Image: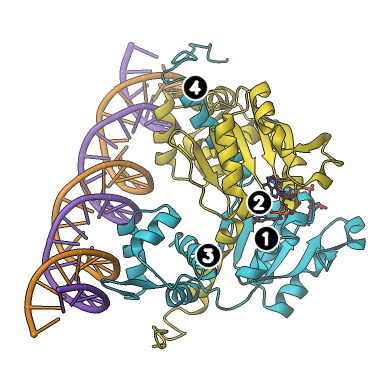
Chain colours: A yellow, B cyan, C purple, D orange
Amino acid sequence: MARLPIYLRALTTLVERGIGTCSSEDLAAATGVNSAKLRKDLSYLGSYGTRGVGYDVDYLRYQIAREIGVTQDWPVVIVGIGNLGNALANYSGFRSRGFRVVALLDAAPERHAEAVAGLEVRPFDDLEQIVAAEAVSIGVIATPAVAAQDVADRMVAAGVTSILNFAPTVLSVPDGVDVRKVDLSIELQILAYHEQRKAAPDGELGPTPDQEVIA
Amino acid sequence: MARLPIYLRALTTLVERGIGTCSSEDLAAATGVNSAKLRKDLSYLGSYGTRGVGYDVDYLRYQIAREIGVTQDWPVVIVGIGNLGNALANYSGFRSRGFRVVALLDAAPERHAEAVAGLEVRPFDDLEQIVAAEAVSIGVIATPAVAAQDVADRMVAAGVTSILNFAPTVLSVPDGVDVRKVDLSIELQILAYHEQRKAAPDGELGPTPDQEVIA
DNA sequence: CTCGTTTTGTTCTTCCGTTCACAAACTCCT
DNA sequence: AGGAGTTTGTGAACGGAAGAACAAAACGAG
Ligand SMILES: NC(=O)c1ccc[n+]([C@@H]2O[C@H](COP(=O)([O-])OP(=O)(O)OC[C@H]3O[C@@H](n4cnc5c(N)ncnc54)[C@H](O)[C@@H]3O)[C@@H](O)[C@H]2O)c1
Ligand SMILES: NC(=O)c1ccc[n+]([C@@H]2O[C@H](COP(=O)([O-])OP(=O)(O)OC[C@H]3O[C@@H](n4cnc5c(N)ncnc54)[C@H](O)[C@@H]3O)[C@@H](O)[C@H]2O)c1
């Protein structure tokens, strides 16, 4: 379930606030989901609540973390250390959530001088060696779109089986390899779509401006 | 529909390749969706195809762009010019897709000296003035999580009605305001979840390690 | 010990999105 | 002109997720 990480985050903030027990209503309010849906999600993991009382925050948090798999550390490589790759490498939130950036790779030789976030930027050709040596199964692609498919192919060949792709391209990968994409332009476009609807409740621009079908 | 931007992107690459016509099968292959679903999505916008032929790439692209609302330019403000805010400000993909970054805001005075991507970093308190002057309706939050709700409240009060949130928090906003969130840790956690499943086809870690329920 | 209160776990219903399948419509070749 | 071959648009079936509703279980008061 894609909602488990959200529950986990909410439980972590509850722990930090010293709250020991919470009801499904509380958690639902904190995460913005329906309480019945939340209970159903949790019951899928097992019966970790107590009727009439609620859930033990710390215990539930551990169970969800174990279900997701973040009780162990996941090594991650980031490929493409440009604007975005730099930001990712400097982000502390990964480390605190069970992900360890083991290498930063870039094809451009002029980047190799730099050190980013305490890690040296290494040549892209080191990929296979690093993946093998560190048992990396998760790779992050932050290269330009044209390079993304090539990088993905190399990653898969090297043994990576999960890819987080920031490049605005559809990647094709073999079965058994998971790809998740983050496309910021798409997010903004979805906002713009709704924004346009708010401004023009009905077809303000004309329902179909009967433009010539181009030749 | 959340898939329209994906179609739009695929059509744009087809235009760049000089392809004038494509079938629903072609587009479906390029975007990774089912062709029937794609046809149904497109038919929701109107009958823009020709049976036996397919869709005119350029015409369809314009229709989708118009439906999304990216035929006009959307002014955008970015708040929180740290690691991520810098990357966003330097990203050219927004501009080319109909979004114009009109201001970069940060609460920290030491940032105000800098200029990022040709724009000066301005005090957060300029928010209201900028939103009013530029008719901004879309705001991007790239501040730490603790500040995100405050920033969102100020944005909404200033007149922003769509927010893209990168901070790992659930924002609460009044009705009529859209929020989309991008949480990279959640994406990685979802990958980790599937990764764990691949490694341990059944409950390898023990189905429920019968741990003491904490007192 | 019993009853009322609270909250979980689950069932049942409803609804929405996806997919299949096919008729209508268009092109091209003969 | 007619028929074969394509491809769209859509009606109908399917599946699964979301929400409402309720019985079972725990707790506390009296
Ligand atoms: N910057 C953003 O905020 C942002 C936002 C949304 C999407 N994106 C996407 O993220 C990707 C990266 O964006 P960016 O702004 O960091 O770009 P960038 O140009 O700053 O960085 C790209 C980096 O990738 C490296 N690279 C190029 N080809 C490579 C290859 N074959 N192997 C390894 N490394 C290679 C380059 O040397 C460069 O350092 C792009 O696809 C972009 O569309 C970026
Ligand atoms: N860097 C990443 O790759 C990354 C990845 C995932 C999520 N995020 C999230 O994005 C957000 C920003 O990350 P970052 O790495 O850029 O952090 P950062 O600390 O580098 O930058 C945060 C910026 O926000 C400014 N700020 C703080 N409070 C403010 C306020 N009230 N009003 C205006 N500006 C304020 C700070 O001055 C700073 O410049 C965080 O919530 C982080 O969790 C970042």
Q: Earlier in the sequence, mark 2 or mark 3?
A: 3
- Residue labelled with disc 1: B140
Q: Quadrant of residue B42?
A: bottom left
Q: Nearer the viewer, mark 1 or mark 4?
A: 4
Amino acid beneath label 1: Val
Asked if badge 4 and badge 2 are on a common chain, one would say yes
Tell me if mark 1 has few (under 14), some (14-19) or many (20+) residues whose alpha carbon lies within 10 angstroms of its own: many
Contact, CB < 8 Å: mark 2 with mark 1?
Answer: yes
Q: Quadrant of residue D1?
A: bottom left
CA separation in Å, label 4 and label 2: 31 Å
- Residue labelled with disc 4: B199
Q: Earlier in the sequence, mark 4 or mark 2?
A: 2
Is A95 displayed left or right of B19 in the figure? right
User: What residue sits 50% from the left and 15% below the top?
Assistant: B205
Q: Earlier in the sequence, mark 4 or mark 3?
A: 3
User: What residue sits 67% from the left and 23% below the top?
Assistant: A134
Percent x, y of residue B98: 61, 72
Asked if badge 3 and badge 1 are on a common chain, one would say yes
- Residue labelled with disc 3: B13
Q: Nearer the viewer, mark 4 or mark 3?
A: 3
Quadrant of the rendering where the N terminus of chain B is positioned: bottom left
Quadrant of the rendering where the C terminus of chain B is positioned: top right
